[in-house]
Image: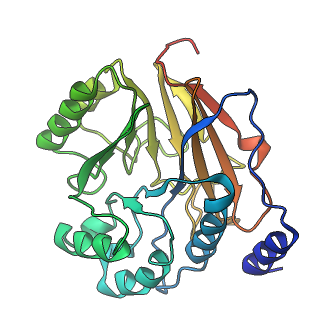
Amino acid sequence: MKLRTLLSTYLLLGSIIAPPLASAAEPVLRFAVLGDAEPKPKAEFPGLAAAVGHVNHLTDILDLDFVIGVGDIAHKGTELQYQAVTPVLQRLTLPFYPIMGNEEHGSSVERYMEYAQRWNEGKAEIPGPRYVLEFEQLALVMASPDEGRDFHDEGIAWVRQQIRQLHPKPVLLVVHGAPAGTFPENPDKGIHHPRFAEISNHPNLVAMISGDLHMDMDRTEHSKQIDGVHHLHMPALERTKIPDESRHVPMFRVVTVLDDGQVVVDTYQVGLDGPLQRHDYRFMLRRSAHQ
């Protein structure tokens, strides 16, 4: 059965429900995260389109606040791909806060910003390729890379400054690629700047959200804690690469912040009822090297 048909069936039955919570704590912030798209060879986005429909229906049920993206939407940053994906992303009912990936750097920052604003007409203003979303309980530092998936010195300085200024507020850092070596499935890809380790050491940096690797959630270790920082991989919506390309299942993740400081990360398979319990991941908004 096609994904859209599956989703429609579940909606008619009223069976998409909020994920069960382990405590009586109440949600104070909840947002969806969309992973890489960048389809090839054709500029077609069926996985992303189905995910947008799924997120829109979850918006009312789960009271979602917004959606973020981890980059690599338009393959090689071509005008053709940007044009094809724009009506898909414009269907999101919530504000969409994206960052750039290495694919967007195949073109220009100006082209990316032009389309990021189009995706959000009437919903939000994207101030630039890097920005901060601040809330009472935490902040998201949205850090587009400077080149490819890496940072220059000025990019590192900007991220450090934001996290320092936000201290002691907990920070979730949204980057396209994780620090190289974080995910051993492809240890060479990611952020290589030697000073990025200084960012990881900030006491109020709690988690990093990244994409880039196109990992199969069922065949990789997609969520982990390293030196007190939680690393959350976002699966790709159009193509899976790791451990191989033989199986692709579109998924996205939903992050819920509870009033007791717990963060619940749920994973949804596009078109299916409820979160996948096998991918449930939880942590606290306080940094500890031994959680």
Please, which residue is most extreme toward the left here? 154
Q: Residue 199, image x and y in percent?
A: 28, 28
Residue 247, quarter of the rendered image: bottom right
* Left or right: 179 in relation to 44: left
Of the 4 image quadrants, the one containing the C terminus is top right
* Left or right: 290 in relation to 207: right
Which residue corresponds to the image point at 42% horizontal and 55% vertical from the top-left?
70
Which residue corresponds to the image point at 52% horizontal and 84% vertical from the top-left?
44
Which residue corresponds to the image point at 50% horizontal and 35% vertical from the top-left?
231
Q: Which sits in the foreground, 108 or 148? A: 108
Against 246, is 215 above or below?
above
Residue 73, quarter of the rendered image: bottom left
Q: Residue 116, image x and y in percent?
A: 31, 70
Of the 4 image quadrants, the one containing the N terminus is bottom right
Against 181, is 174 above or below?
below
* Left or right: 152 in relation to 254: left
* Left or right: 167 in relation to 14: left
Q: Which sits in the foreground, 231 or 171? A: 171
Q: Residue 209, image x and y in percent?
A: 46, 43
Q: Which sits in the foreground, 284 or 84? A: 284
Which residue corresponds to the image point at 32% horizontal and 61% vertical from the top-left?
102
Q: Which sits in the foreground, 37 or 141? A: 141
Q: How many marks?
A: 0
Q: How is the image coloured?
A: rainbow
Q: Residue 256, image x and y in percent?
A: 59, 41
Residue 68, quarter of the rendered image: bottom left
Please, which residue is most extreme toward the right here? 13
